[in-house]
Amino acid sequence: MPLTFGSPLDSETSEVFMPLYTGKRKRTRTVAGNGKSSLSGPSEQDNLDMFDREQLVKLLIHALKELGYNISAQALQAETGGIQVESTVVQKLFNIIRRGNFESITLELLSQLPLKYGSLGLKDVIEDLQLGSDLSPHIKDEDSMKIGNVVSESADWKKVVDQMEQQLKTFENFVPSSGRSFSSQTLLQLTTLVEVMVLINKEIFLELLFDQRDSHMAVAFLRNCLRKFIEIWDSLLALRNDILDEDAPFTPEKLLKDMTTILTSPETSILQSSTWQGSAAKSRDLLIEEISNYINPNDLVPRNRLLTLLKQAIKYQRSQDVLYISDDGDNLIMDDEEEGERNNGLFNHKFNLLQDNSSNFQQIKFTEEKTLVQNADEIWFLQFSPNGRYLASATADSLTDRKIMIYDVQNDFQVYKVLAGIDLCVLYLSFSPDSRYIVSCPFNKKANIYDIHSKGEPTFINPTVEGGIVAEIIQPMDSFQIPAGPSSTSNNSSEPPRIWCCDWFHTPEHEGRFIVGSPDREVVVYDLKSKTILMKLSSSICTSSNGITNVSQGTAEQFPRVHDLKITADDKYLILMPHQGNIDVYDLSDFPNNEKIEKNEVAIDKVVLPRVSRFNIPNRMTCISLPQVKDSNSPLASLMLVSLKSNELQLWDFHEQILIQKYFGQKQEQFIIRSCFGYNDKLIASGSEDGKIYIWDRINGNIIGVLTAHVAERPATSGNNKKPTKTCNTVVWSPTDKKLFASGGDDGYIKIWRVEKE
């Protein structure tokens, strides 16, 4: 019997509760007789004095040019005494690049660039390294810096290659050999300079290969120049003790690999299409944009700077409305993590720049669309299929072996299949990525796998309507138990461990595999095709990322009691949640794919999975949830929601091991309550022991709505003597319809909900 909360009036509340707080508070001003506010504000001159006038002018000139008003930009530039949005040196370099006059690029020119970390003073470096006159043959005279120098419209590629080889010798003199060292500031500036030179040499290589179609010269240039510049870059990074992000798109190793691979890749390959822009002009524009990232903004106004400031202002204005939840049309402004939606054409909203955009407030409304009544007992688990077509439910019904129902979402939630062959209550369900198979985890220590499209015995559980479907009862296509082992802590060591949770691999390389977890200290990988257990993780993991401390080597640390687990969408990480204590994250990157195992290219029993992250949560946990994202580069990909038996939910970044947000309001102290992300991951939803659904804004943590969902008494069933309770056990959100979600409770009902804006 759960604990009681609140007053008897709780059951009489309206269907949807909305908090009384709304948006930003407005200060009322007293208006004097002359119509002016009695509260004096800053004057126009005071407002202007807050900003640097030259920067304002640069911003205006740059914005006019980006809008195509070049004559107006020139007029403003002349009126202000010739203020430049680009410094003279930057203009010189960019003009050289636009015209393809790469033979004019020298170390002297690059060293005068106003970099973010300061310009590299050649004289200081020479004195620092005591190089004397070693560099004199390679340094041009000051005339090379004159803007009036004429550059040719087309590149003389032999001169370009000769110049780059000469500059390579100059740069090699700057690379510290034995006994030489740099100050940290000089090292940072020199590294930046070399990165710019690497980008320039990359452009030369690409133009030789794709524009000039001279593969022989391109290969020679890659070998003699570009590769050696990359080696210099790598050696400087080593001196700085930089720890490079292995997923970063621009690293010495990755660049060299890509440039080598592109020589043999077909023209239609993704690598080639993403590397070469189709023409020399477009490729040079991209090079200028890349180099711009290294330039001090005071000497080069960043691209789209005014638009960036406007978007930041609108985003701030919208953030003041605590109940505001953006639609897809606002994603470009509101959510940095959804910046990619701009490329999909979803941005279709115009913002008013002449007044504050304090959102024409539309209150979110949650409407109960349908109630499914076919189940006779408590609903413990719900899950939508990945394609959004089906909804699976698991019940605690002890009177029948038909404890799982599959509902057809597109056919008015009629029952599609009834899954039989289950003796005890079902704790967990998991759909395969193709939405065809489903794994059930009941109390009887046996996992069952069903093909939901297999034929079965008809049952007339659906009402007879025109166009209705006839549900079928199907049996498991496969079942398995985890063999008892030394890690098992079940009451009888000869009995197999219990299976309480499951998740599938998502990528094609691991098709047909899933992982199940046990509270008896075991996790196994199962292959549906071969119907075998591939690995027992209790003897195949290490407790440190360096792979030294292995659990199987008799260490003091025991394998955890796993109550929930998740595999990330890219199959890179496995997250294990115990009932209480530490959540562990393991790296699955080296887990062999189907092809390697089929060809016996790897010994599966020799594979070791390193633990890459661990964070402590002292309160008792009931479930973990991941956002519905498929892009591993999304900022949301590392988020994890944890439900706790302390009346709260916690949002973590499992990469950084940072607690991001907490959500309060729901009642959870006794039972397993399952929560989820929803509405394109903008919302957090959870059941509660008071029978209600609580919904929060993911970012701000404020309650957006409370739904009276499962507060009615459960219908009496013959032979069922359990005392009825009022608990909403689970909430799930459709992965394909952001406005659709479902809930299940102890009343035996499944309720279908829809999000609307009034």
Image: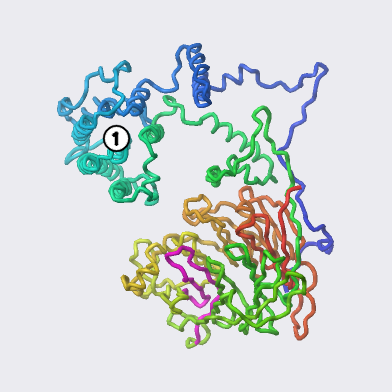
Q: Label 1, on which residue?
A: 197
Please state which of residues 344 and 308 is positioned toward the viewer in this rendering: 344
Residue segment shown in magenta: 495-523
Residue at image x 71%, y 54%? 755
Amino acid type, mark 1 = Met
Residue at image x 31%, y 35%? 200
User: Is residue 494 part of the magenta span, yes or no?
Assistant: no
Residue at image x 75%, y 64%? 370
Please state which of residues 235 and 680 is positioned toward the viewer in this rendering: 680
Q: Position of residue 276 (x, y in %)?
A: 37, 41
User: Is residue 521 part of the magenta span, yes or no?
Assistant: yes
Q: Position of residue 20 (x, y in %)?
A: 77, 47
Q: Is residue 240 above or below residue 570?
A: above
Q: How is the image coloured?
A: rainbow
Q: Position of residue 648 (x, y in %)?
A: 64, 59
Q: Is residue 577 visible?
A: no
- The part of the image, by quadrant, that contains residue 387 is bottom right
Q: Is residue 114 above or below residue 240?
A: above
Residue at image x 69%, y 41%? 321
